[in-house]
Amino acid sequence: MRDTAKDETFTMRVALMWIVNDLPAYGMASEWSSSGVMGCPVCMKDTPAFYLQNDRKACYFNCHRQFLPSDHPYRRNKKAFTKNRVERKVARPRLTGEHIHDSVEEFSSAVEVPLSLLNGFGIKHKWTKKNIF
């Protein structure tokens, strides 16, 4: 690969973390709205995502390092990721089916009200309705 700004070549290393349709498909199946800052169905309200300042788009930059093993070299890498930051956060454990069931118990099986009127939508949760499965 060639960096035209620095006029030098470099070796690019990439990793395929997931494919584009995985998250939207997961969101449709789970009834968790996978858009916006709380769009991660694993992190839910504890996501480290943020909105970009000028265009208000959700940004998940650097959120993936918390899922790596604690001794992984990428966690200590201060140059390739967020500047001068070592990742110490541990990813939250996956929720059990019982915990998810308890969190959606208050919702109806079909949305009868606009999402904005669902108690806590976008602040505490992103559930759109109770899944029928």
Image (tube, rainbow, N blue to C red):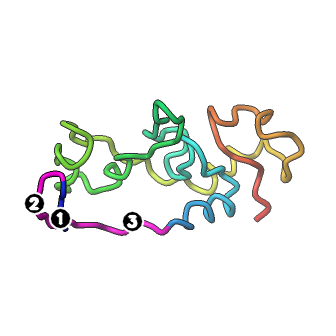
Sequence order check: which comes first, mark 3 or mark 2?
A: 2
Q: Is residue 17 above or below residue 123?
A: below
Identify the main secondary structure in magenta: loop
Q: Compute the Cα span from label 1 to label 3.
A: 24 Å
For the C terminus, the quadrant is bottom right
Depth check: give the residue in front, 105 or 36: 36
How many residues crowd around disc 2 within 10 Å: few (fewer than 14), some, or many (20 or more)? few
Q: Residue furthest left?
A: 8
For the N terminus, the quadrant is bottom left
Is residue 11 inside the magenta stretch? yes
Sequence order check: which comes first, mark 1 or mark 3?
A: 1
SS state under label 2: strand
What amino acid is labelled 1 in the image? Answer: Arg
The residue that appears at 77% across and 52% down in the rendered structure is: 130
Depth check: give the residue in front, 94 or 81: 81
Depth check: give the residue in front, 63 or 119: 63
